[in-house]
Each structure stands twice: as C-alpha cells, then as structure tokens.
C-alpha cells in the first residue's frame, strides 16, 4: 500500500466549452492535512466531486485511497468520509439515530455501531445528549459530531467542506485538534475553506484559480514565495487579476 | 444629510432579551458614536442577530433601553424606521425580481426613488449595473451581497446596520465589501456591523466581543490586542499535536491553543519575565526530547483576547 492517499494527475473536467478543472496535478500523503483553497467558481467543488467519485473526469486520472476514481468510484466512496457543515447530519433525528443511520449506510454491524457510538460520544463529551435532536445541540458540538460520524467507518481519507465557520475561536481550535488527532492516527484530511487564517492550520495548501492550481506548498512556503506575511495577501494577488462577476 | 441628533448614534443600556429558557441578551450596555464603524464580533448564537433586530425596532427589549439617533426603539419606532438602513443576515431580497426591480421596490417602500437615492449608492451600483436586469436569485454571492447593501442604502438612512454581511462569501468579495464600508464611513455614515470572523475586527474603529449574550469587552482593535494581560508566546514545532500536549503539561500553563502554523502559549504567572519563561519552556521541551522547537514572544490579537476573556467568563 502506498503512502500517497490522493494522487491526481492532469485531472480535468470540461462542461461543454468551459473547462472547470484544468489539468490539476497534486499528491496528498497519508496522515497529511491538506487545505484546498480557491475563490467561488475557481473549480474546487468540481475537483472534489471527481475525487469522491461523483463526477467522471474528462481527462487525466486520480487515485484516492488506492482506487481509481474513474473506474472504481464505489471502492473510492467506501474508503472515504465526507463532512459538510450544512448537509452531513439530519436535524430531525437524534444524535444516536444519526450515528446508527450512518453506521448502517457504511455497512457496520450493530455491535460495531454500538461500540463506536460509545467511544465517539465519550470523546466529544456528548453522552448526555444522545437522545437530543441534532437541531437542538449547539453548532460547535454539531461540527464535532459530524466529523466523528464522517470517521465512523475508519475511512483512509476524509473530505471536509467548510468545516468550522461560525463557531467561537475556542470551539474552532478544539475542532482543529480533532483533525490533528485523526491525522496523527493516519487519516488523510482534505479541507476546503473560504477563510485564509484557517488555511494556516493545514500542513500544506493549494490555491485554485480559474480551474488550475496557482500555488501549492506549506503555508509558510507559499507566503515566502510571494514575499507576503499572510495567505490573504497571496490570495488577493492571485485572484485580483480575474475580477469576480 | 440632516442635522445630527444629540449624543451618541446608538445608546444601549442594560438590554436583556429572553426567548423561553434562552437568555439571548444579558444586560448589554454600549454606545456607538456618530460616524463610527462599529463591529460586533462573536460566534453563531452569541446574540448578535437579536441585538441587531432590537436596534432596528423589530424586537422589543425585555429590559433596558435602546436609543438609536436619539430615538427610543419602542416609543419612537415610526420616526426611527425611515432613518435606519438594515441588511439582515439572511438574503432577504426578492429572488424573482431583477436587481433593479428590487432596488426600486425598496426605495418606494420608504417613499423614495432609485433616482433620488442614486448618489448614495453610486459606487456600489456602478459595479452592479451590468447585471441590473438579472434576477436577484441568479446573482453570485458577492453580487447578492452588494445588491442587498444598495437596497439598505437607497432611502438615504443616517445609520446602517449590517448583520453578518460577509458570511459565506469568498476572501476577495469580503475584502471588496469592507472597502465599500470604508467608503461609506468616510462619507460620514454611521455603520454598525456584525461578523463571526475575528480577522475582520481590524477593519472597525471599535469592536465589541460578544459571547453568550454578553459583551466581553469593547475597544479599538489594536488596543484589545495590546491589553492582553500577559506576554504571549508563539511556539513552533514539527509536531503540533505533540507540542500542544506537552505545553499543557507545563506546570505554569494558563492557555495553550493552536494558532495557524504555531501554538500560542500564555503563562499563568504574573510575576515572571518573558526571558525567564522562554528559558524555562526551552528547558522543559528539551527534557521531553522534542526536536526543532522555537519559542518567541508574539503580539496578541483579537482572537487571543477573545479566547482569554471567554475562558475567564466560563471560569467565573
């Protein structure tokens, strides 16, 4: 088994005449926290839909968790987790019901679900709220729960879409510590975010502009290559040329 | 512009508001001066929207007084409503009307017209005009936000309330939006804005940090950082998770948090010096055989202050 969890080579997607993702090439190592950045419309979402096996590439290839996204999309989906702040959990189900539902979807046995539910709730301190509707629990807990649920089946790669917006700075940092713990245990994490101060928490980042990767490296290296002190500045330099509509 | 009312643009004293069990606002007191760009910084659920809805006369206070432009939000609401501009957090324009139709509608609600309001919205409307005929629902996030700002401004209000105007928009659009607010403030308009993003605090004249219905502190952004009660240290190491755990085991640790590529450390003691703390920490990490650790003094920012006072509040 290789140490590379995501290996995209010339990955391309066209919609008619429009090239949404233009031959992107990058690797993410096992246990790495990789920030996937770009302005709205830069092609991030299209790229991620290909990486999670929901959209076929027009050209190029990508291996995710050891499987080809074009020829083995179902195997890819079995080995990844996905969390989006808005869509991962069912508000009208309780904490316990959500975990049971996802455990079932991922094909876990009842005994496995029960055991993992116990560990998971203990870790994030939500035991007392197991029968609460998800709608009623605070946003910070909801995010930690959604992340834990995305990890429930022991995926090798987890995709986090805008995971921490709107929470207080302490809750946000607790969340990042959960991400670091998962990464230290060997899970590869790919995070998208609009907030560039957030990107500084990643091991490495890439910034997409007009479908292509315009910068990639550790946050420090990317800042150094533009001789600026913040990723915000890098982002503005890269995107100001193509002013938004 | 009409003559300015006496006193502050906003005066809030002892404001409390409850929704059933939830204390949304708990004895909130502050003022906003005329011509100020004032920011409320706090997470979702801190009470920002309740506060904004009260200031624009859409909610009644349970206790306390709220005066805007010298007018009481309860007794003088009709006089006040035409003087305030309000951009709610959720997109609240008519998606099936065009950009221009929305603008004409909001002008007419206040007995004005697009033509009358044109000068005020000019710099923003110029960017939007190419899309004037597009359905509002079909605009990009950044453009929706600018249209909403135009709609809140077109009747020439004396004060503008913007509730989380930059949530969900990308970094470029956020920056442009704050540039627009700068321009409005330069024109003399009082602007009150809320945001969950700490990095936007520096764009305000003064900010109030809010958490769980209370104001933690109010001051100029630079002052808030400078008044952090202890020296703050940035600790850089190859393994962030390991250094976090290690520093938290240091006997004098008061606060240890990841902060981008580094970890921020605050010591519990008030009677030590930065040099001494660095020497002790260095010895501590060397004893744990943690390689490549760099420790330096770093200036505290809004987030550091927010976390410090938040933790104090929870401990109290």
Image: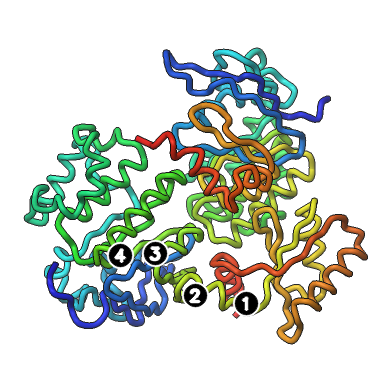
Residue count near mark 1 (Cα–Cα under 10 Å), binned few <14, some 14–19, many ≥20: few
Q: Nearer the viewer, mark 1 or mark 2?
A: 2
Q: Earlier in the sequence, mark 4 or mark 2?
A: 4
**Mark 1 → mark 4, Cα distance in angstroms:** 34 Å
Q: Chain of mark 1?
A: B
- Is residue A102 visible in the rendered structure shown here? no
The residue sitting at 43% across, 68% down in the picture is B22
Q: Which residue is mark 1?
A: B315
- Between A40 and B122, the one lying in front of the other is B122
Query: In the orientation shown, which residue stands out farthest toward the front?
Result: A227
**Mark 4 → mark 2, Cα distance in angstroms:** 21 Å
Q: Give the quarter of the image for residue B236.
A: bottom right
Q: Secondary structure at mark 3?
A: helix
Q: Nearer the viewer, mark 4 or mark 2?
A: 4
Give yes or no for contact between labels 3 and 4 (Cβ–Cβ under 8 Å): no
Q: Which residue is mark 3?
A: B48
Residue count near mark 3 (Cα–Cα under 10 Å), binned few <14, some 14–19, many ≥20: many
Q: Chain of mark 4?
A: B
Q: Earlier in the sequence, mark 1 or mark 2?
A: 2
- Between B247 and A142, the one lying in front of the other is B247
Q: Earlier in the sequence, mark 3 or mark 4?
A: 3
Q: Which residue is mark 2?
A: B216
Residue count near mark 4 (Cα–Cα under 10 Å), binned few <14, some 14–19, many ≥20: many
- Is residue A210 visible in the rendered structure shown here? yes
């Amino acid at each position: 088994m290789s140490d590379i969890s995501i290996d995209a080579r010339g990955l391309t997607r066209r919609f008619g005449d429009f090239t949404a993702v233009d031959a992107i090439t990058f690797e993410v190592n096992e246990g790495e926290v990789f920030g996937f950045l770009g302005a709205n419309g830069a092609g991030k979402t299209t790229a991620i839909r290909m990486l999670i096996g929901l959209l076929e590439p027009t050209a190029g290839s990508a291996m995710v968790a050891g499987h080809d996204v074009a020829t083995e999309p179902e195997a890819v989906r079995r080995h990844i987790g996905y969390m989006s702040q808005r869509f991962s959990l069912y508000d009208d189900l309780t904490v316990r019901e959500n975990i049971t539902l996802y455990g079932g979807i991922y094909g876990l046995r009842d005994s496995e679900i029960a055991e993992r539910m116990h560990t998971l709730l203990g870790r994030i301190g939500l035991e007392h709220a197991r029968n609460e509707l998800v709608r009623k629990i605070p946003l910070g807990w909801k995010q930690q729960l959604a992340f834990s649920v995305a990890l429930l089946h022991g995926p090798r790669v987890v995709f986090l879409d805008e995971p921490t917006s709107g929470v207080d700075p302490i809750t946000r940092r607790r969340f990042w510590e959960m991400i670091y713990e998962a990464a230290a245990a060997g899970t590869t994490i790919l995070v998208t975010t609009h907030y560039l101060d957030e990107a500084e928490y990643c091991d490495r980042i890439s910034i997409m502009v007009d479908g292509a990767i315009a910068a990639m490296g550790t946050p420090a290296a990317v800042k150094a290559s533009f001789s600026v002190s913040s990723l915000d500045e890098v982002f503005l330099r890269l995107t100001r040329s193509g002013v938004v509509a | 512009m009409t003559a300015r009312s006496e006193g502050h643009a906003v005066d809030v004293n002892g404001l409390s508001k409850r929704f059933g069990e939830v204390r949304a606002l708990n004895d909130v007191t502050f003022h906003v001066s005329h011509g100020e760009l004032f920011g409320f910084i706090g997470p979702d659920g801190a009470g920002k929207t309740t506060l904004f809805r009260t200031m624009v006369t859409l909610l009644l206070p349970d206790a306390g007084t709220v005066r805007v432009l010298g007018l009481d939000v309860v007794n003088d609401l009709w006089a006040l409503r035409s003087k305030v501009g309000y951009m709610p957090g959720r997109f609240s324009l008519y998606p099936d009307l065009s950009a221009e139709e929305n603008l004409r509608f909001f002008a007419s609600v206040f007995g004005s017209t697009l033509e009358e309001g044109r000068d005020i919205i000019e710099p923003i409307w110029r960017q939007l005009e190419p899309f004037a005929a597009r359905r509002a629902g079909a605009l990009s996030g950044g453009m929706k936000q600018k249209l909403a700002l135009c709609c809140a401004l077109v009747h020439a209000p004396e004060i503008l309330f913007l509730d989380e105007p930059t949530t969900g928009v990308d970094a470029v659009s956020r920056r442009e939006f704050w540039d627009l607010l700068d321009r409005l403030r330069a024109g003399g308009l009082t602007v009150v804005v809320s945001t969950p993003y700490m990095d936007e605090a520096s764009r305000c004249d003064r900010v109030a940090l809010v958490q769980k219905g209370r104001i933690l502190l109010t001051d100029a952004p630079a002052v808030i950082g400078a008044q952090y009660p202890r020296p703050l240290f940035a600790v850089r190491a190859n393994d962030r998770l390991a250094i976090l755990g290690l520093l938290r085991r240091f006997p004098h640790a008061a606060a240890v948090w990841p902060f981008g590529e580094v970890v921020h450390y605050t010591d519990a003691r008030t009677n030590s010096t930065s040099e001494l703390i660095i020497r002790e920490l260095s010895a501590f990490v060397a004893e744990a055989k943690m390689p490549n650790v760099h420790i330096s003094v770093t200036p505290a920012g809004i987030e550091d202050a927010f976390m410090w006072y938040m933790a104090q509040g929870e401990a109290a």
